[in-house]
Image (tube, rainbow, N blue to C red):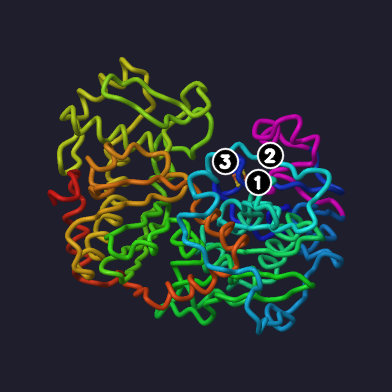
Amino acid sequence: MKLSDILSIDLPCGGHGFCGRCRVRAIGSLSPVTREEEEKLSPARLKDGFRLACMAEALGPVTFPDLNLVSDGKSKAVAMAQEADSRPASGTAAKTASKPQDTPVVELRTQLFSARTLASRAVPSELPASLPAHLGVAVDIGTTTIAAYYFDLETHKLLAAKGQINPQRLFGFDVISRIEAASRGKSQALTTLIKSTVSDLIPRQTERVVLTGNTTMLYLYEGLDPLPLSRAPFTMEHSFGELLTREGRQVILPPTFSAYLGADTACALLASGMSAHPEKTSLLMDIGTNGELVLQHEGKLYAASAAAGPALEGGKIASGMPSVPGAISHLDEGWHVETIGKQPVKGYCGSGLIDLLAVLRKKGLVDVSGRLEESPFSAVLWSTKLPAFTQADIRELQLCIASIGAAVERLLAISGASKIDHLCLSGGFGSGIDPTSARQIGLIPASTRLSALGNAAGAGASMLLLQPGYLDEMVRIKDRLTVIEIGGDPAFEEAFLRHMSLMPFEEI
Ligand code: FES
């Protein structure tokens, strides 16, 4: 039986051994390594027991140590007995009646660190051998990666930060695939995977934990059925915002706003400090496959999420790739490129694509409708040796820009705001883009002030860890926030078509 059948996982390249994305560590009685596996896995990885699930076959019992799953080799994998977490999600979770003791809510700006400093600090990736007496961990459960930040709760010192791939990726790369997997009977496996990974990141003596993430990730972590999150009317039966006691430690689950605006958005909002200046019109943008937007105007908050698609993460783009070494992250009008890690060029990541599109617009090689002057551009590609970039790529990027732009336009229209005082870009992508290029092609609106926050969700979770009193503030923020459903809104559809034009937001 193939490992992919044992694990019931998605096979992005159809199981032909081309993509290497079904990589999994498997120990036991297995078929010999194939040519495809030798090509896709380094000798060190092979030595560590990594295999391509679409190629390797179980000849007898197999253990998947990173997934805490086992199989007899003839049937589907099951959770290892000692790792399976059968605790009911909230049955054992005692909601504490009392408020935290150490929670004077201090003004956001006076915090010891901000989202930006958390992102830019050179932080050790390993914990010190001797742990402090009062250890706290803030965990940001992302769909792709899980980040954990370790703090001394007494001194507020950031001790270490660790990153780990979310093992649920075996069941799909986005939230919808995970929900579909859960609906196909994989919910227990998804919950076991995430719980055991997170629990491995939390030392036994940890006193307080904050768990943030998008709504689906928190649902799966808590063992709740995520199916209603993906189907109209997209109801969110559980919205968290709780301080619990589990296994003798405090566990804080920040509030979620809607099926698509999760605790990570709530944490990013906290870290942005926007609510400390309600007189300002501020916009928080987190741009990824899903764009999360929160606008503050005249003291009220309006939030929306827009399906942006994978183009800005390099998906569906001929030479697109994630932000990894070798990806072009910036490009100027002289066609000079900057690559991540200063490595030889391999393709474009999102920020490089934005620069490229802005340069092509400036040089008149792409018109406002997105039409590419194919033959002069081919000559440029030939002379500069830049990776391929096609008309189809431009259309993919336009869909993404239009979706974000139209959602911002709707928020401005509904709130009555006419200009933005402060634009906060959160997430790795937001921090890496050139704002001038992004404005030129209509991806972000103009603003008096712009801040790139880095991992604002992780920073907000860390603030909550150090000052649990912020939970009250987050719940209050939730109460004055209106979630705007843009799906099916004719005004959004109309704005979407206009925002396909590659011009500054204000000129559309
Ligand atoms: S699914 Fe692509 S290599 Fe296995």
Residue 36 forms part of the magenta stretch: yes
Mark 3: is the Cβ under 8 angstroms from ligand 1?
yes
- Can residue 5 be seen in the rendering of this structure? no
Residue that numbered label 3 is attached to: 19
In reply to whether residue 450 is colored magenta, the answer given is no
Q: To which residue does mark 2 refer? A: 124
Quick one: 495 or 391, which is closer to the camera? 495
| Crowd rating for badge 1 (residues with CA inside 10 Å; few <14, some 14–19, many 20+) | many
Residue 256: x %, y % from top left? 49, 71
Q: What is the C-alpha distance between the residues marked 3 and 1?
A: 29 Å
Mark 2 or mark 1, which is nearer the start of the sequence?
A: 2
Residue for point 28% across, 64% down: 279
Assign the N terminus to one quadrant of the image. bottom right
Q: Is residue 6 above or below residue 48?
A: below
Point out the stretch of residues depicted in magenta.
33-60
Residue 250 image point, x, y percent: 70, 70
The residue depicted at 49 percent of the width and 53 percent of the height is 456
The residue indicated by pointer 1 is 161
Give the structural element (helix, strand or loop) at label 2: loop
